[in-house]
Image: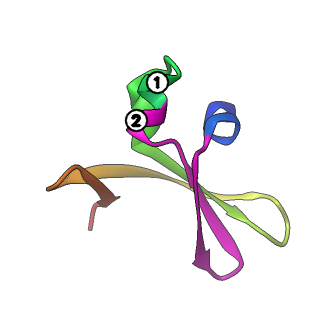
Amino acid sequence: MTTIFDEADTETAIGGNCRLHRVSRRTAKARGLDERVARFAVILSDDSQKIVTVLAMYRRGCGRYSLRT
């Protein structure tokens, strides 16, 4: 999980004082990381700086990732 925080190139505010951190597939490939690291995202609380959850992201058409519902 340290890799996601160290290499994260996407950080998105998602509400509730939380941010989603993830590594894009392009960045993972360019930096020689295992491509599987791009399949996960970490939600971090802005208030306590603690991990709220780790999400598995799934590919949906057009190469975009989303949560599986």
Spot occupied by residue 63 in the image (x, y as percentages of width and height): 22, 49
Q: Which numbered marker is on residue 30? A: 1
- The answer to whether 35 appears left or right of 46 in the picture is left
Q: Could you say where residue 39 lies in the image, as x and y percent from the top left?
A: 39, 41
10 horizontally vs 63: left or right:
right
Marking on residue 50:
none
Q: Which residues are magenta?
A: 8-27
* Quadrant of image for the N terminus: top right
The picture places residue 51, in percent across and down from the top left corner, at 70, 56
Question: In the rendered image, which residue does mark 2 sit on?
Answer: 26
Tag 2's secondary structure? Answer: helix
Binning the other alpha carbons within 10 Å of mark 1 as few (below 14), some (14 to 19) or many (20 upward) gives: few
Q: Residue at x 78, y 58 (%)?
A: 50
Measure the alpha-carbon separation of dots 2 and 1.
6 Å
Q: Are marks 2 and 1 in contact (CB under 8 Å)?
A: yes
Q: For residue 25: magenta?
A: yes
> Viewer-proximal residue, 34 or 9?
9
